[in-house]
Image: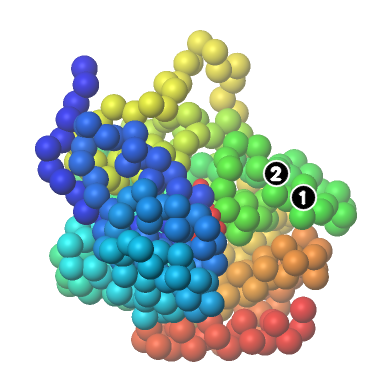
Amino acid sequence: MKGTDNQILNVSILGSTGSIGTQALEVIDDLKGIKDIRVTALTGNSNVKLLEEQVRKYKPQTAAAADEKSAAELRLRLADTDTKVVSGEDGLIEAASADKTDMVLSAIVGFAGLVPTMHSIKCGKDIALANKETLVTAGSLFMNAVAENNVRLLPVDSEHCAIFQSMLGGKRAEVSKILLTASGGPFFGRSRGELKSVTKADALKHPNWTMGAKITIDSATLMNKGLEVLEARWLFDVDIEDIEVIVHRESIIHSMVEFCDRSIIAQMSLPSMKHPIQYAFTYPNRLPSPDKPVSFSDLAEMTFYKPDEETFRCLALAKKAGKTGGTMPAIMNAANEAAVAAFLSDKIGFLDIADIVENTMNTFEAKQNPTIEEIIETDREVRTQICQHC
Ligand code: NDP
């Protein structure tokens, strides 16, 4: 049976030129005739050509490029349109708080997403959250702002969308544990010795998901799962000890919730980020999707393993940062972002990523109950220090 939803949704897409952003625009196309979703703002960093194409197709009021030179070029290219082109962090903030916008899809990669997303919340916009680094680094401030401004927060990370859906199967007080699934990445089962010589090309080959470069490397080191533990801790207000990571190679179960009666509720679907994006756009309704259904009779098997936290230390380091709290998750995140950028520029090896994160966490002291300005300053200090060394 075909469903429809008559309510118009105005969305701003922060990071529209990225993997999540482009899939979000595909979801909007897929839903044509079923749900009317209008684009109020689009943002990118330096991919001017794609941003121009998107603006010409979706006709937003505002387009922002974080990079000033790219914005100047975009302004020239779009001179014949009605779209206002803005630049830099102020431009991202303007795009994030456009008057008409009902919902902001936060899909900028990394810490750069924090300030614009916080602005959206303060302007009362509902948030579809893909950018996990915002919650990791400023979880307490972020969740307080969500509550104070009474906005809806819909997780777009597939695991957190699965947990959100599974939570609907019981009451919050009845939850005993979250079972967070992980694909294990391209290097599942390898020893430290075998990881010494892996290349950037090897690390960018994810078995189940096609994603931006940074999250793909995070998946290979298992830092992505560490970030997701902290993301789940804030989104669902659970202790880190009550989040169990399980490697599930097939990525069919996107995560599960165990309730106090030992009943476990899971969300399953073939791996596609279009599912959580669509769910965020249509919640609380479900609308038809062109995604293929799971065929259980064609699935050879579903496997489950304990993660190897000794070889893939980033998972353990992220949990440790979460338990320390304060600015430590921001220290850990900045070290990871700087190390991943250095790895992607062929300046360091794969195993150096975890070493840099660990050394940085040992060097910097965490400050408890930080303000947003202190978190931003911590991020800057950590990056500056790491950039001096690699
Ligand atoms: P991509 O690298 O594909 O895209 C990132 C987007 O952010 C692009 O639009 C890019 O612009 C923009 N951007 C990059 N740097 C800046 C900056 N300094 N200031 C403003 N904008 C910037 O990332 P993904 O789409 O893969 O990931 C986005 C977020 O979603 C990440 O936080 C990731 O962890 C999360 N996520 C992603 C998933 C996925 O399947 N891809 C799954 C779950 C979560 P430009 O193109 O011009 O460089």
Q: Secondary structure at mark 2?
A: loop
Q: Few, some or many C-alpha atoms within 10 Å of disc 1 (few <14, some 14-19, many ≥20)?
A: few
Residue 384, image x, y percentages: 64, 87
Q: Residue at x 75, y 67 (%)?
A: 345
Say which residue appears at 22% left-offset and 32% top-offset: 34
Under mark 1, the amino acid is Ala
Residue 355's place in the image compared with 56, above or below, is below
Q: Residue at x 12, y 37 (%)?
A: 6
Image x and y of residue 287, in percent: 25, 31
Q: Quadrant of the N terminus?
A: top left
Residue nearest the viewer, comparing 78 with 125: 78
Question: Type of residue at label 2?
Answer: Lys
Visible residue check, residue 92: no
Packing grade of label 2 (10 A; few <14, some 14-19, many >=20) is some
Numbered label attached to residue 205: 2
Q: Check the image and name the residue furthest to the top.
A: 297
**Which of 64 and 260 lies nearest the eye of the viewer?**
64
Res 223 quadrant in image: bottom right
Q: Nearer the viewer, residue 59 or 212?
A: 59
Q: Is residue 259 left or right of residue 329?
A: left
Element carrying mark 1: helix
Residue holding disc 1: 201
On the image, the x and y values in percent for residue 389 come to 77, 83
Are the residues at dot 1 and dot 2 in contact (C-beta closer than 8 Å)?
Answer: yes
Tell me the quadrant of the picture where the C terminus can be found: bottom right
Return the residue nearer the eye: 106 or 56.
56
Mark-to-mark CA distance, 1 and 2: 7 Å
Q: Which label was assigned to residue 12?
A: none
Rendered position, 19 above or below 72: above
In the picture, measured across the screen, residue 183 lies left or right of residue 34, that is right
